[in-house]
Amino acid sequence: MSENNSTRGDMPVDEFRQLGHQMIDWIADYLKNIEQYPVLSQIKPGDVKNKLPQQPPETGDGLKNIFDDINNIIMPGITHWNHPGFMAYFNSTASGPGILAEFLSAAFNANGMLWRTCPSSTELEQLTLGWLRQMLILPDDYWGIIYDTASVSTLHAIAAAREYAGEKFALRKKGMIGNSAPRFRLYCSEQAHSSVDKGALTLGIGIDGIRKIAVDEKFRLIPGELKNAIDEDKANGWLPFCVVATIGTTSTTSIDPLDEIAKICNAENIWLHVDAAYGGTAAIVPEMRCILNGIEHADSIVVNPHKWMFTPVDLSAFFTRKPDVLKRAFSLVAEYLKTTEQNKVESYMDYGVQLGRRFRSLKLWFIIRYFGVDGIIERLRFHLKLTQDFAAWIKAHQYFKQMAPAPLSVICFRAVLKNKTEDEIDKLNEMLMNNVNSTGKIFLSHTKLHDRFVIRLAISGINTKEKHVELAKTLLDEKLNELKNNG
Ligand SMILES: *Cc1c(COP(=O)(O)O)cnc(C)c1O
């Protein structure tokens, strides 16, 4: 038990101060020495749980003992997302200002459900999303809200789309069952993220209500196929109500042709949601803004600063040009939540499923202020350059082959050896990836393209430099040579 642990009240402030300083030192050392840890945790399932007592402690413990467990038991089970060798999935790193803002947010413990429950939370959210909107050059009529993840942002987009199309069937009142409304149909490409399906499932659209549209040789949704699908469905009694276009798909970062898709949606009055969870951030770079061409004709967009904008998870920015529809889908004000100022101010609880909400805008505000827009642009540009350098290396390589265009900061490739079947090549690449990952220095992930195993290398870590990409090359060469020589 710590010396100050009494049976009433919180940890004494003096103890908090002392331990807090120690913890900051610990975190600073951790960040400084992060490359000493294996980027991908090397433990086995159960290793963490089984080393800790299964019963809760009856009496309190000092932070010293808790920290010993952090060092000895928790740390081996951490996959280090802040490690510059993390090149799997979409690497998201937490920057210093973002980490510090999280401390502050926990200290305020503000719940921004209503304006009055924390005016600064609501107003800073409005302000920072206004900044982000300008950085992305979204039209002025895009209104923003922060949710936790892109999955939840997209769920809200689909709910708004359903409300928009369902208004004439009194959907809000009657619901989906026992309604005379036709079957709702949502469209996205075969390469769209599974969160689109999950959102549709949650909202009662059903698997049959999701229609996947074919992609071209660059993994982009084919607008003509979308148009045909909508026409066919309308003739068969479906109600096309939502299209999701993706700017930066999860497998290959392909970019759907937004402009052409928007034309189709506008002509049919169908809600167009843009999933730019990862890729949207690139549009902050002036020469990359073209990836959002057509956004002025869409209805909503999600961009995750927690993916490529150095923001600790979680923070997903959702913008829509029809906030009134979103509000119609969700607003229900219980008596105990009514306030005198409610007609003059915005209460974010009216725009979604959740009531309570964290003060997330604080970290986005810290990050944009600390780095500045130019600082963010320079970092993104550097990642784009590192990616092109790596692509050039793949192109010149005797055995590696790039398997999809790399318009952003992810490359899909695989080793191709002569005299091997496609199945053998799949297995070889899987082993190659696992062998690189087991070095603990670089962490790569994979996807399947045309049903074939493909290695993915993503560069979006704030501390990833040339030497880390060089190390990835060296390890890929080394491990491939071993595999070639052994079989
Ligand atoms: C990562 C990703 C998502 C899901 O993001 P979460 O914030 O983890 O829910 C959705 N769409 C795309 C394109 C993504 O890359």
Image (cartoon, helix red, strand yellow):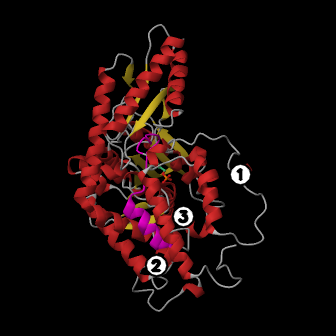
Q: Which residue is mark 3?
A: 169
* Front disc: 3 or 2: 2
**Residue 145 seen anywhere in this rendered image of the structure:** no
Near mark 3 (Cα within 10 A), the count class, few <14, some 14-19 or many ≥20, is some
In this orientation, which residue lies closer to the viewer: 482 or 180?
482
Q: How far apart in space, not on screen, are marks 3 and 1 (Cα)?
A: 51 Å
Instruction: Describe the element under mark 3 as helix, strand or loop.
Output: helix
* Front disc: 3 or 1: 1
What residue span does the magenta drawing correspond to?
A: 84-106
Q: Is residue 283 left or right of residue 117?
A: left
Q: Is residue 40 left or right of residue 55?
A: left
**Residue 339 seen anywhere in this rendered image of the structure:** yes
> Picture coordinates of residue 459 (x, y %)?
37, 41
Q: How far apart in space, not on screen, are marks 3 and 2 (Cα)?
A: 27 Å
- On screen, residue 203 above or below 192: below
Q: Which residue is mark 1?
A: 49
In this orientation, which residue lies closer to the viewer: 430 or 57?
57
Amino acid bearing label 2: Ser
Kindly indicate the quadrant of the structure image that contains residue 133: bottom left
Which of the image's four quarters has the N terminus? bottom right
Amino acid bearing label 1: Lys
Q: Does residue 16 belong to the magenta stretch?
A: no
Which dot marks residue 347? 2
* Residue at (56% x, 49% y) in the render: 78
Choose the circle earlier in sequence order: 2 or 1: 1
